Image: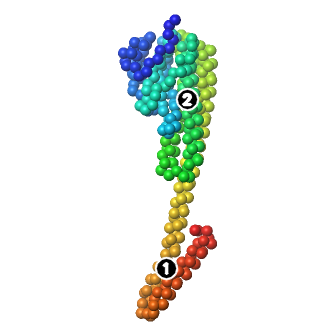
Amino acid sequence: MAVRWLDLVDPTREQLVDALEVHVASEVLEMLLAAPVERPRQHLEGHGEYVFGVLVAMSPVPEEDRIESREVGFVATTERLLTVRKTPPVGEAWAPECLEVAGDVSVGELVFRLVDDVADSFLDVVDAADAEIDELEDHIDDWPSARVRRRISSLRHDLIHARRTVGATRAKVRRIMDKRLDIANEELFPEKVERLFADTYETLFRAGEELDMARDLLASSRDYHQSLIAENQNEVVKKLTVIASALLLPTLIVGFYGQNFLHSFNDFYWSIGVSVGLIVASTIAQLAVFRWRHWI
């Protein structure tokens, strides 16, 4: 029995050409051989004898506070599915357990299992993002402001990338469901397989909705953090105003006393005692008023 699935990891040009059953376009070959990037783009196209695709599975890495994109390309004919897995710049290549346990199924169902596994990876991203946002909300009052800003910025970019990837994947799956993507004889995705893709579409729709919700929660955390910064700045300004006000009257007393009574009061108690008494009395009175008005 012919092998229905062949897997390659970071192949050379010679290995890829030898593994292909059909002649593929040069741009398809170049995309399959292209070096992995941090945030790859997705493709799914029909080319007469074969269907070519590049999918992006996402895997959260909680210990490093990041989301890893794992690119997997494929070429599918009626007889064989060839997958080309690429090892990302940091991390591991996509794991094909879903295809290893598939058993003796058609190539179309193998493609479904591949796409469905990629769709499920976005739900893992949603769970990880919710956990990260919960942690951020728990520590937003005690973490340094710079750390909170970095974490919010990193999460925001990861969520935007994940949402765009989910939207692109959902659009590709929709093309299969609408019978707009197949090989020339329409045997790769029969009606039975197309119905399976409906479940994947629902998974992608759910992932997109929950990612939008996570972005809203993150935006709320960002607004709360900004309000904390504004509140802290107001407290600093209030304290500086109290200090300036407390020093204003003593400065006025010393200046007025020194300019107008330089030779009038030569006794010690007049020059030191009275001025110090006025300064202390005026300062205590100001502090009492500030305390009464709840300014300090």
Q: Is residue 133 left or right of residue 52?
A: right
The color scheme shown is rainbow
Residue located beneath label 1 in the image? 250
Q: Are marks 1 and 2 in contact (CB under 8 Å)?
A: no
Is 188 or 3 nearer to us in this picture?
A: 3
The reply to whether residue 71 is in sight is no
Q: Residue at x 57, y 51 (%)?
A: 224
The percent coordinates of residue 259 (x first, y second) are: 43, 87
Query: Where residue 56 appears, x then y in whole percent?
Result: 49, 27
Mark 2, secondary structure of its residue: helix
- Residue 68 in percent (x, y) is at 48, 33
Instruction: Using the image, tell me which numbered label, if any, was put on residue 121.
Output: 2
Compared with 275, 111 (above or below) is above
Q: Is residue 279 above or below residue 158?
A: below
Count of all numbered marks drawn on residues in the image: 2
Query: What kind of residue is marked 1?
Result: Pro
Q: Quick check: 254 above or below 67?
A: below
Compare residues 239 and 189 and report the one nearer the observer: 239
Q: Residue at x 52, y 60 (%)?
A: 233
Of 71 and 7, which appears nearest the observer? Answer: 7
Mark 1 residue element: helix
Whichever of callouts 1 and 2 sits on the residue coming sooner in the sequence is: 2
- Res 291 → quadrant: bottom right
Front one among 121 and 277? 277
